[in-house]
Image (spheres, grey):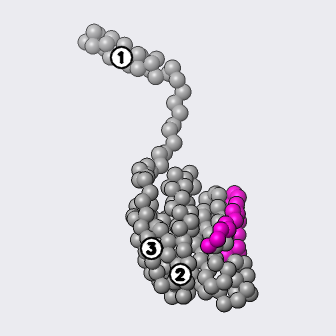
Amino acid sequence: MANKFTIVLYCVSMLVLGSCSQDYVPKPRGFQRFDLPAPTYKTYKNDCGFECEIPVEAVVLPDFSAQHEKCWFNIFYQPYNATLHISVSTVESKEKLTKLTEDAHTLVYKHTVKADEITESYLENEHLRGVVYEISGNTASNFQFYVTDTSKYYVRGALYFNVQTNIDSVAPVLAYLKNDVLHMIETLRWKSN
């Protein structure tokens, strides 16, 4: 009996002495891992005045919001539970174009309450002019844009994740989706009527 007691006491003392050599530091909870595929695209055509390339895994869905208009639609990225909300408007006058761009600017800057920073990048080529907004921080939308041909069409987009997110957890997916949206803008071609 004393022999068993000695062995148990020896084992317990070794465990106690061995466990005291380092301070325990709890590990942070892990984030979901995404395996991001190489991007591949398909041509998206519509009756709203333009065509462009979108990712093959994206699905175009109609917009069912209460204030939706004919050329409002959503590009749904199912693997990432994110949606690019697109609204297309016609430009009848310079005043209407000014109002549309001011509305886009106002909608972006509503995120100022939670944004760490808002960066504007201006786009201009032979096909379009516009602005890309990158909104850093834990905001509802981290990426928005508008583009126009300045005479007939205006397209606005806002990327949202469909769940509340922590920006650190979605940063790789956000970067991936931003590249997809920028590819869409680069390949956008206006239809002439």
Residue 111 magenta = yes
Q: Nearer the viewer, residue 88 or 23?
A: 88
Q: Residue at x 29, y 10 (%)?
A: 2
Q: Marks 2 and 1, Cα distance to the nearest angstrom?
A: 80 Å
Amino acid tagged 3: Tyr
Q: Which residue is under mark 3?
A: 44
Q: Quadrant of residue 123?
A: bottom right
Identify the element where label 2 is drawn.
Answer: loop
Please report the bounds of the magenta region as a residue range.
Answer: 104-127
Quadrant where the N terminus sits is: top left
Q: Identify the mark at residue 11; answer none if there is no mark.
A: 1
Residue 156 visible in this rendered orientation of the protein:
yes
Residue 189 horizontal side relative to residue 11, left or right: right
Q: Position of residue 94 (x, y in %)?
A: 73, 86
Q: Which residue is under mark 2?
A: 191
Q: Marks 3 and 2, Cα distance to the nearest angstrom?
A: 13 Å
